[in-house]
């Protein structure tokens, strides 16, 4: 939610703070940049002491949201930026904990549901950012920041109390380490990369999450030449992500139960290709609505589906496996959004580029045939 607070009101926020729109963009851009740096240390910290570091992530997120309150005035941009940096520093701890939390607190049959709910919460935060920022607008930045601070503080307190009062039933039921898995830093990444399943999943996340970030970042200027207003585009994005929240919570547990991981990933890829090509060939309100809704419903659930697979293949380092995939996703967001932005002035080409990026991932998905079922995992 904090990540995208200013994304829907970039122009108005730039006027409020007296800075350029690209400078306002820093408030969102710090999140993937800091995640890339903090993913590995956060994963190792969580795998060693989940409750302590997860509580620290909640506290750090709340501290950043509270610090943003000093940035309500025209001269307060620097405080907003520092607050965003603190929240961004908490992000690796919070995102990477979803899989580790399911591993430690839930029985194996319930873990896909736990991972799905945690992942859906990430996308629900995007929806809340779109809705609240669009509803209040740049004229009410102070109210936006107060709302975010209250939400973050209550969430951090509730999380800390829950962690303090809970037991960890599967704390001692940990899987044997894979050779070389518990090594440090870059060696740990190399060990995960050496696993063909984890490597294939990382590539799919890089592409899928990268295209999602590119759509969220650039779809408004891409659709504007077709006569679609900013408010209409914001509504379409909200519906797109809200649909993804629902399917992210519902679909992955069913996929895990029926072992349909590969079919759902291939279907999501093909549907996203068709959606992007449709918007490239015939831009308009109807095609945008159909394309974005299809993308949200099918592309977003792919992340919890792949995180569930990572939970089974990542041995004792559950947070490390999740961090590896989120690292790939954040890197994809940076790269694909940058490439799309380079051709943003030609909408049909930008949508075609996104379709091509997804198309390059379909062979990688097919290469995982027969490897994603429980028979090939560490259960």
Image (cartoon, rainbow, N blue to C red):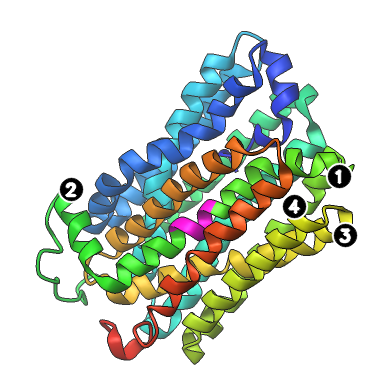
Please tell me which of labels 1 and 3 falls first in the chain: 1
The secondary element bearing badge 3 is classed as: helix
**Which of pointers 2 and 4 lies earlier in the amino acid sequence?**
2
Main secondary structure of the magenta stretch: helix
Quadrant in the picture for residue 136: top right
Residue 370 in the image: state x and y as whole percent.
37, 88
The label on residue 238 is 4
Q: In this view of the protein, which residue sits in the foreground, 159 or 336?
A: 336
Q: State the residue position of label 2.
A: 185
Q: Which residues are magenta?
A: 206-210
The answer to whether 251 is drawn above or below residue 283 in the figure is below
Mark-to-mark CA distance, 2 and 4: 37 Å
Q: Which residue is mark 1?
A: 226
- Residue 87 seen by the camera: yes
- On the image, numbered disc 3 is attached to which residue? 286
Mark in front: 4 vs 3: 3
Disc number lying in front (1 or 3): 1
Residue at screen point 23% across, 63% down: 192
Q: Label 1 to label 3, Cα distance in Å?
A: 11 Å
For disc 3, the neighbor class at 10 Å (few under 14, some 14 to 19, many from 20) is few
Q: Tell me the distance, in whole angstroms, between the alpha carbons under discs 4 and 3.
A: 16 Å
Please tell me whether residue 35 belongs to the stretch shown in magenta.
no
Kindly state the secondary structure of the residue where label 2 is placed: helix
Disc nearest the viewer among 2 and 3:
3
Q: Mark 4 or mark 1: which comes first in sequence? A: 1
Q: In what element is the residue under mark 1?
A: helix
Q: Quadrant of residue 358?
A: bottom right
Image depth: mark 1 or mark 2 in front: 1
């Amino acid at each position: 939610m904090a990540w995208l607070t200013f994304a829907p009101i970039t122009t108005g926020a730039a006027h409020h703070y007296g800075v350029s729109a690209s400078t306002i963009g820093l408030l969102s851009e710090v999140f993937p940049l800091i995640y890339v740096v903090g993913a590995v240390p956060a994963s190792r910290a969580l795998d060693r002491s989940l409750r302590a570091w997860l509580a620290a992530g909640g506290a750090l997120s709340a501290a950043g949201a509270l610090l943003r309150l000093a940035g309500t005035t025209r001269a307060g941009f620097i405080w907003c930026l520092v607050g965003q940096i603190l929240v961004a520093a908490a992000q690796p701890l919070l995102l990477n904990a979803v899989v580790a939390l399911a591993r430690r607190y839930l029985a194996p049959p319930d873990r896909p549901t736990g991972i799905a709910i945690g992942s859906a919460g990430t996308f629900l935060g995007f929806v809340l950012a779109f809705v609240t920022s669009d509803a209040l607008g740049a004229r009410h930045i102070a109210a936006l920041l107060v709302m975010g601070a209250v939400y973050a503080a209550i969430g951090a307190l509730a999380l800390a109390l829950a962690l303090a009062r809970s037991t960890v039933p599967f704390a001692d039921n940990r899987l044997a380490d894979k050779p070389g898995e518990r090594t440090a830093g870059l060696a740990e990444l190399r060990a995960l990369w050496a696993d063909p399943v984890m490597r294939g999943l990382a590539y799919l996340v890089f592409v899928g999450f990268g295209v999602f970030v590119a759509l969220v970042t650039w779809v408004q200027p891409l659709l504007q030449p077709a006569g679609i207003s900013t408010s209409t585009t914001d509504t379409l994005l909200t519906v797109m992500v809200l649909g993804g929240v629902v399917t992210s919570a519902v679909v992955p547990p069913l996929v895990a139960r029926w072992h349909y991981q590969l079919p759902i990933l291939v279907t999501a890829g093909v549907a996203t290709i068709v959606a992007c090509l449709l918007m490239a060939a015939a831009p308009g309100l109807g095609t945008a609505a159909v394309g974005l809704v299809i993308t949200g419903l099918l592309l977003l659930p792919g992340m919890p589906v792949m995180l569930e697979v990572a939970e089974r293949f990542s041995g004792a380092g559950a947070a490390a496996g999740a961090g590896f995939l989120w690292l790939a996703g954040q890197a994809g967001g940076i790269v694909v959004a940058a490439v799309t932005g380079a051709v943003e002035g030609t909408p049909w080409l930008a949508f075609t580029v996104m379709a091509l990026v997804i198309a390059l991932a379909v062979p990688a998905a097919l290469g995982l045939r027969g490897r994603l079922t429980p028979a090939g995992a560490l259960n």
